Image: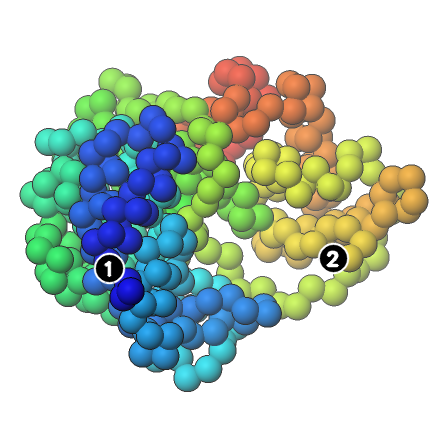
Amino acid sequence: MPADPTALRQALAEEIATANPTLDPAWHDAVAAVPRELFVGDAVFRLTGGVWEPVRRAEVGQDEWLRMVYSDQTWVTQIDGRDAADATGPVSGSPTSSATLPSLVVRTAQVAQLQPGQKVLEVGTGTGYSTAVLCHRLGAGNVVSIEYDPGVAARAAVHLHDAGHTPTLAVGDGLQGCTEHAGYDAIIATCSVRSIPPSWFWQLNDGGSITTTISGWMLAAGLIRLVLDDEGTAHGRFTDDTITYMLARPHERPPSSRVFRLDGDTRSTRQAPGLLKEWAGKFVAQLAAPSAEFMTIESGIVLRDVATGSQAWTESDGEGATVHQHGPLRLWDQVEDALAAWQKAGAPDLTEFGMTATPYEQTVWIGSPTGPNWRLPI
Ligand SMILES: C[S@@+](CC[C@H](N)C(=O)[O-])C[C@H]1O[C@@H](n2cnc3c(N)ncnc32)[C@H](O)[C@@H]1O
């Protein structure tokens, strides 16, 4: 029997609602209504053996394509600025645009506590799928969406038009907000940020909220909703979601050269390097060394500070592990101190973490603002 997009949409909405029983049925209805096949286009990338292989509708056939489109998966549509539709063969690089998995689209909206009538700025239009979901629930007149990449934005505009939605669309750096239409009740980002861009504070209405993933150069992320108080300070707590979005383009790491492990001071570790393979442990490490990137190697892990070239790399030595630290920053010392503070607090998951933020100073803390805390790079 040929695949029926309406039935597949309905089944996807059911699957998402079953997995997330507290989801407002209105978001289920939005997933059941929005034709994702109009947004994904005709080609996507699939990671196969470490490279991104283009997969085309014309090659896999209509039925298989629809099943892919209506699976709860992110489909990468662009690698390092190159569109899947233009790829002639496998490419390597990092995703720069995608159709976010539908469960995450509605989960983000759920965390944002969006209600009909609220005016929302979405940062990262991408394919336009999440924009359409927002339009279905909030009304297109309440949705403004901004996309950094002009080509991606142009295609999203066509997709949204074809699906019958007419939100306000803008092209530009959403980290500057979208001044022209400012006065938002909520800002939601479908890309991650290293800290909250100052413009977002200034473009929110009193009591407005910001929902975003806070991430960084170790690619450790936490989803959070911050609410603006009367004094212009935003407060919030992270959720327990282990999800992330790709980093906002201006917050991406500068291109880095190949890493050669360099000798330096050597000592035994006091904290297990394996803690950085856990969601919260890596998040803590990133707070402690915000300009360092993280890599795994066979013997352990490597941290490399993008700004100074400082390195810390570990290797197991039977009982425990040895760390080698090179350069002006002692990255592992920083990380180990933070991990110790986290463990002293009971090694909690991200729901025990909160954030206090102004345009000038932003802190992530454990327990309360007076608990262990780290400043984010603004
Ligand atoms: C994960 S994709 C968005 C997926 C989209 N919401 C969907 O459902 O198809 C992230 C998008 O954010 C965009 N982006 C990255 N940095 C941005 C910025 N500073 N301003 C606006 N858009 C940005 C990327 O180009 C990419 O299209």
Q: Residue beneath label 2, please? A: 297
- Amino acid type of disc 2? Ile
Residue located 27% across and 66% down the image: 2
Label 2 to label 1: alpha-carbon separation: 45 Å
- Amino acid type of disc 1? Asp
The quarter in which the C terminus is drawn is top left
Residue 122: image location, x then y, percent: 24, 45
Q: Upstream in the sequence, badge 2 or badge 1?
A: 1
Q: Residue beneath label 1, please? A: 4
Residue located 90% across and 46% down the image: 317
Please, is residue 203 above or below residue 292 in the view? above
The quarter in which the N terminus is drawn is bottom left
Please, is residue 110 above or below residue 149 in the view? above
Residue located 77% across and 57% down the image: 298
Rendering colour mode: rainbow
Please tell me how crowded label 1 is: few (under 14), some (14-19), or many (20+) other residues with Cα within 10 Å. Answer: few
**68 and 172: which is toward the camera:** 68
Please, is residue 238 above or below residue 6 in the view? above
Visible residue check, residue 283: yes
Foreground label between 2 and 1 = 1
Residue 340's image quarter? top right
Residue located 10% across and 31% down the image: 117
Visible residue check, residue 211: no
